[in-house]
Amino acid sequence: MKKSKNKISRRDVLKGAAHAGLAAALLPLSGFSNAEQQKSNLIVEENKKPGTTDWQLTFIKSEQFRSKLIEGYCSKTSVRSGETLDIFLNAASQTDISIDIYRMGYYGGKGGRFVKRLGPFPVSPQLVPPIAENRLRQCEWEIATSLKIPQDWLSGVYLGKLSCSTHRYESYIIFIVRDDRKADLMFQTSDNTWQAYNKWPDTFSLYDSDPPQQSLSGRTWVSYNRPYAKYPQVVDQPLSQGSGEFLLWEYSLCFWLEQQGYDVTYCSNIDTHTDPSGLDRVKCFLSVGHDEYWTLQMFENVKKAVDRGLNAAFLSGNALMWVIDLKPEVDVDTANLDPASGLSKAGVGRLPLKPDASGAPYRTIQRIGRFGGFSEAEKKLGIMGPFAKDDWPNENTLIGARTVYPFNGSADWIITKPDHWIFEGTGMRKGDRIPGLVGWEHHGDPAKIPGLEVVAEGTTTNGAEQKSHYTATVYPGPKGNWVFNAATIYWSFGLAVPPGVITPNSHFGRPHGADERVQKITANFLKRCGV
Amino acid sequence: MKKHTNLISRRQVLMDAAKAGLVTTLLPLAGFANISQEKRGLIEAENKKPGSTDWQLTRVRPDKDAQRCPSIEGYCSKQSLKAGESLDIMVSTDQKVKFEIEIFRTGYYGGCGARLMKKLGPFDGYSQPVPKPGLKGLHECKWKPCTSITIPDDWLSGVYLGRLTTLPSDENVPYWQSYIIFIVRDDRPADVLFQCSDNTWQAYNRWPNNYSVYTHPKGVEGPWADVSFDRPYGRQSQYTGVVNDPLSFGSGEFLSLEQPLSYFLEEHGYDVSYCSNSDMISPERGLKCKSFISVGHDEYWDIRQYNSVVKMRDEGVNLLFLSGNSVCWVSPFRANSNGQENRIIFRGGPYGAQNKYAVDRENLNGPFPERGPDEGFLMGVRNIDPITGGGDWIITKPEHWMFKDTGIKKGDRIPGLIGWEYMGEPAPIPGLEIVAEGTAWSGGVKPQRWASTIYTAPKGNIVFSASTIFWAQALGMPPGHTLPWSHWSRPHGPDKRVQQIMHNLLRKSGAS
């Protein structure tokens, strides 16, 4: 087992941070004003560089959602420039794999910019890891390459397109480049949720359990040390092979923000967990798409930041439903491994594991509770939990509303408060609809927060019959700041449809794509946040 | 029958031309420019009218077999018609519920993709019967029309969608939708004639669940099944293998495989007029146009269509086969039980004369009553076995004029543009040039050679075969469009190089 890689790269992180501190000390004033000057133009300037639509995959072989002919993963969800990212690659037979790195943005409508080709690197077949306790699959692959992020790679979401010399199939790796600059917007990717739904190699998501099947319990753990399998539901998108859910529910927002030239910086869910003061760098925090899995620490970090005056927009649905524990890599005791079956020699048993305090941190996810505890309807369902602890803070105290049962469904986004400032200049009247924008998960049950207003609401339909209710909300923070909850995973589809994006179709409903009203509402909110 | 606007507007054009002629003596050059301006003006002016993205379906509910949406579905009495003619619209709803019909013309419209022309209804919906399959599995609906519309004089030729929407009285009851589709055609001498591949839409239409020309119990590719245009278009039949597009409910394969081309042509103001496969039974319509386009998946042609297009080519019409698997099967038209012409088709036999692939198909699935000529001598390339698969479109002759201003070099690739069906084995036509060729992989495994060709016909007109169903995917990305993924391969969407190739081909074909 080669744990050392991750330890080394953690030391690099510390060194990188020290360098950054030194540089700041050397160039105090001019550096600062330059940074301020540059700040507002960074995204605009970046997007003037030539883009390409070649960031898209062409040939994708998904077998049981997995691209076993060519696949990989990264040692971290996010990395700063100057820090090092380890990249792990696998192929079905010995080959040479190249990695074309693209930064995702607008780039004249092309949606991505080619930044660097790495490799080719010789890659030999790697082991699909045995099934450990809690159904955990943690890869221990060889490092194919270590990439030190250059100083001029602007914060963003980066895709690595993998291709090789022995066949034409491709897949992605994905990582976030974060920074420490002051910016207007913080775009948080929902990578905990990507990993929760990741079935790699076939049936090993957080929703699969050993018998008896308990999809919503704490019995299953999942590891970040795995490639992202193709997303298994709602939309048949081959471009999700290796890229989590970024290209499904998040990229459209990234594309639109960069098109508009907003000063946006990016981070991973993990950064929200580890770096509370990082939230003070921005005017508005964005939860994006499907942002279901948060740690209690993440909740507290964002809640406190809102109390300090941070604006927040939950352009997401089903956000903060589950509380997770983020554990380090684990040690799997392979003494009793039967290599043929991948199980323990005893037959059906799982290999024992224990969290490894010296392993890379934040690489293992366990579901440990329901934010706000179970609702009466959820208790009646009897399929959720059990968990050791029930009294978690209610997510609606942060979002403004919360996940309600039935969780899934579709609906038009119907305006109920057209006189609210968020609708200024949209020309919308009470009852106007954004077709199909609500789905496939939403928020309802608004919190009793002083000043909270429900700006849009309606009935969702689950399947063809079952009803639920969604509420989009806006409430004021204590410092003149604001929190908006769009109450739908699909919000970003109303902003833009970048190259390669596929409109989802779920519960017999679908959004229509870019809508000037949704663009205006989003812009109004961001403007109110001082952006 | 009323004289329709297009005649009037043609007269107007002529009058303008006359005036221009008058002016010409005074201002020769400017006058000439005006005529061209006027002609292009039809599509340009139409596309300046306000569009809406709200032509898309939002809520579609397939039944258990996933092919139809009995909540609301319908069909039209004609594939195409002219302004001044009338169309019956038949609709069924499985519940008693009110519904409305919104008619949209598809085009560019500032990127919105369609314009609302008219709202019809509300009507009282009720359930209309699924017919018992007749001999050869025929499902000919005899539904009562809910309405009949006379196409107004100012409805420009185009592909029209009727969006059917139920109007439940209770706000908490979900509404359901699907489309009807029809083509408004005209007789104007347009630069470009866009032929919809509606024979192929119908050949693959499984409505109500399993009744296409591919689903007969005797076999997949024989002459045994009849299909009727008197029934709704079900979902795109290969939605699990090519493109899962919910907008295909009721709209055939237009939105998935053809709309991006229409969107592109109208975006750029090309003078385009539209027709159905069934409008090509005689060559008259085509002979008035400078170029003819076969689009997307254009597999089924009545032999009279073939003869028409040969005649058009020989008379100087430019032919652009922006399609794959084209002219593969002879599909004779028949009248329906009311005697209305061109409402039933079946697989009558292969095109390909005595070519091996034609003979093989005859031996496997025949005897067939029909055998078409070698389609390679029309298109330049032929249907081949295997015909399915995916690959890059690879340029082999970058110096050809069709690549002017594209910056393309030999070996450059348009990623994933080949698929999911294509053509190859170029015919020995004097002067025929292969401009692109390469390998497609059927099932991701089995290699097959495809070729894209161009040749000059006797009158100096051109015949181009893009040799892929996906060609239009590289031209435009209308709202709601879903890119296909098939044989483990996918195209990337709009590509400036392919767009420039189109401009080059259209200009060479006399379009301005």
Image (cartoon, coloured by chain):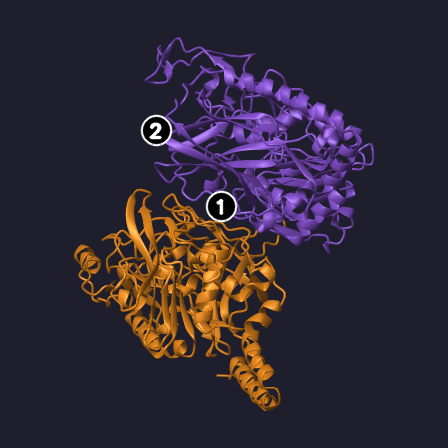
Label 2 sits on residue: A94
Placement of the N terminus of chain A among the 4 image quadrants: top left
The reply to whether label 1 and label 2 mark residues of one chain is yes
Which comes sooner in the sequence, label 1 or label 2? 1
Residue A424's mark? Answer: none
Where residue A272 appears, as percent x and y from the top left, is 66, 27
> In this image, A424 relative to B509: left or right?
right
Above or below B485: residue B334: below
Query: What residue is shown at x 44% (from left), y 22% (from top)?
Result: A141
Q: Is label 1 in a helix, a strand or a loop?
A: loop
Q: Which chain is purple?
A: A
Query: What residue is shown at x 48% (from left), y 77% (from top)?
Result: B85
Amino acid type, mark 1: Asp
Where residue B46 appears, as percent x and y from the top left, is 58, 70
Residue sitting farthest toward the top: A335
Amino acid type, mark 2: Gln
Residue B232 visible, this angle: yes
Where residue A386 appears, as percent x and y from the top left, is 56, 19
Query: What residue is shown at x 32% (from left), y 66% (from top)?
Result: B379
Seen from the viewer's position, the closer of residues A376 and B389 is: B389
Label 1 sits on residue: A54
Above or below B460: residue A75: above
Q: Colour of chain B?
A: orange
Q: Chain ID for label 1?
A: A
Where residue B498 appears, as percent x and y from the top left, is 46, 58
